[in-house]
Image (cartoon, helix red, strand yellow):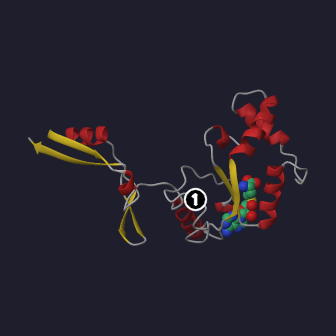
């Protein structure tokens, strides 16, 4: 409910079709919902420092940003269908009382955490077809600061913006840089 104040695209998920149907009922706002979410919306407005009466605005905003309601299985190495998220991944995941309540033991919980973690956005490059390897995303200022911190003197730094046709090639970088530095 708070996510709709920050994100303009939200995807709801559940394992069970009956639960997804309930969410669809609320989303469509045509009386097909068996639970009254009003007190929950009011409470969240209060937590956000707003009047509980702002709940109607929040409900409208939520209905605007929820793009889809899809199946998920957190125990699968690929919890969502491939086309649900943009290829870069999601910016944020919210799991409330899900992983712990659907995992039979701690190792299943940890595996599930890893499975959903792969849905999150991370910088990457492709080592081979389908082999996505994580990288640390750095910008120019961070590279300069790291060089300085480790005792290098920068001689030259060139930054090239990748043209759009190269942008989606083997990684998610927007720029590449070449640096010449000297260790004192
Ligand atoms: C305890 S309920 C929590 C529901 C809700 N988030 C809440 O806080 O009330 C657990 C939810 O996990 C869903 N679930 C069951 N098996 C799952 C699985 N393998 N992957 C993802 N969700 C699952 C259930 O359908 C149910 O909605």
Q: Quadrant of residue 149?
A: top left
Q: CB of residue at label 1: within 8 Å of ligand 1? A: no
Question: In the image, 52: left or right of 125?
Answer: right
Look at 80% across and 42% down and name the residue there.
40
Q: Residue 25: x and y, percent?
A: 84, 54
Name the residue carrying label 1.
85
Question: In the image, 78: left or right of 131?
Answer: right
77 above or below 90? below
141 above or below 79? above
- Quadrant (top left/top right/bottom left/bottom right) for the N terminus: top right
Q: Quadrant of residue 115?
A: bottom right
Callout 1 environment at 10 Å: few (<14), some (14 to 19), or many (20+)? some
Quarter of the render that holds ligand 1: bottom right
Q: Secondary structure at mark 1?
A: loop
28 above or below 21? above
Look at 85% across and 48% down and name the residue there.
29
Look at 54% across and 57% down and name the residue there.
86
Q: Front-most of 156 and 76?
A: 156
Question: In the image, 181: left or right of 163?
Answer: left
Asked if residue 166 can be seen in this view, the reply is: yes
- Quadrant (top left/top right/bottom left/bottom right) for the C terminus: top left
Q: Front-most of 44 and 24?
A: 24
Q: Quadrant of residue 78?
A: bottom right
């Amino acid at each position: 409910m708070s996510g709709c104040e920050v994100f303009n695209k939200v995807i709801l998920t559940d394992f069970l079709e009956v639960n997804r149907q309930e969410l669809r009922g609320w989303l469509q706002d045509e009386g097909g919902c068996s639970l009254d979410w009003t007190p929950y919306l009011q409470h969240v407005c209060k937590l956000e420092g707003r009047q509980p009466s702002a709940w109607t605005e929040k409900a409208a905003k939520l209905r605007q940003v929820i793009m889809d309601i899809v199946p998920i299985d957190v125990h699968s190495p690929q919890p969502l269908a491939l086309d649900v998220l943009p290829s870069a991944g999601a910016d944020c995941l919210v799991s409330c009382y899900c992983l712990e309540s659907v995992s039979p033991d701690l190792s299943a919980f940890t595996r599930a955490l890893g499975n959903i973690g792969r849905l999150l956005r991370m910088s990457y490059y492709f080592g081979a077809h389908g082999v996505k390897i994580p990288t640390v995303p750095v910008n120019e200022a961070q590279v300069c600061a790291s060089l300085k911190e480790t005792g290098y003197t920068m001689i030259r730094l060139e930054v090239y913006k990748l043209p759009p046709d190269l942008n989606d090639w083997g990684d998610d970088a927007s720029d590449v840089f070449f640096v010449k530095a000297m260790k004192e």
